[in-house]
Amino acid sequence: MKPQFAFGCQSGADASLTEVRLTWIVGRCEHMLRFGRVAHERIVGEHSRIVSFRPGAVFALVRRISSDFGPTCCSLSVVQAAKAGQISAPIASVIVSGERLLHVENLAHVSQVLEMVDAMEGDGIDPCDASPNHWRHVAARLNDGRQIRPYTRARHAAWLQRSRTGR
């Protein structure tokens, strides 16, 4: 995966935004977004930038740490940015935090989730818009070693209808 560095930077980000520090040192420490709608971004150094998300936005953060002998740690978190007044647990690299909808820490599970994201996008579904409950479902099923139900267009349409009616 390639890092998603931007050429410009913005300062004075809104305090209600959830910030994520992304570090990119090739072959050592690679933090990247797999999906997410970035509201603001600022470059803080040669190997680091901070991206911000609006309250309620969903994004996926992939972290890979390597040594001279290969990858030592790989993880993927799908996070929903904190809403005003929401209490949330700390998440590595996430400032102002949010709700962790899914978290996996081994290469096999990370690869499986990335394949699911690719399948969603192949079906024309933006993973940012998927039901937060789907990500919770994936986390629970991966942790229990059970089969994961695919996120289909029909499930997505049902989620969109429910979210519009406030249910």
Image (cartoon, helix red, strand yellow):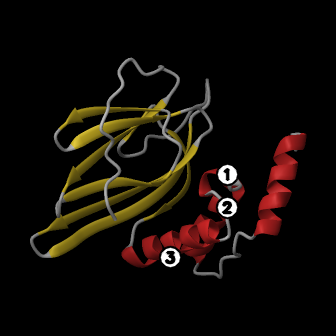
Above or below residue 131? Residue 74 is: below
Residue 141 in the image, given as x and y percentages of width and height:
62, 73
Q: Amino acid at mark 1?
A: Asp
Q: Nearer the viewer, residue 25 or 143?
A: 25
Q: Mark 1 and 3 residues: CB-CB less than 8 Å, in contact? A: no
Q: Nearer the viewer, residue 126 or 64?
A: 126
**Residue 129 - label:** 1
Question: Element at badge 2?
Answer: loop
Residue lying at the far left of the rendered structure? 68
Question: Element at badge 3?
Answer: helix
Residue 49 in the image, given as x and y percentages of width and height:
29, 38
Q: Residues within 10 Å of mark 3 (few under 14, many from 20)?
A: few
Viewport quadrant of the C terminus: top right
Residue lying at the far top of the rendered structure? 12
Residue lying at the far front of the rendered structure? 7
Q: Amino acid at mark 3?
A: Gln
Viewport quadrant of the N terminus: bottom left
Give left or right: position of 13 versus 139. Answer: left
Q: Amino acid at mark 2?
A: Ile
- The residue lying at 66 percent from left, 77 percent from top is 148
- The residue lying at 21 percent from left, 56 percent from top is 29
Question: Element at badge 1?
Answer: helix
Q: Mark 1 and 2 residues: CB-CB less than 8 Å, in contact? A: yes
- Residue hosting label 3: 112
**Residue 125 - label:** 2
- The residue lying at 32 percent from left, 32 percent from top is 8
Q: Earlier in the sequence, mark 3 or mark 2?
A: 3
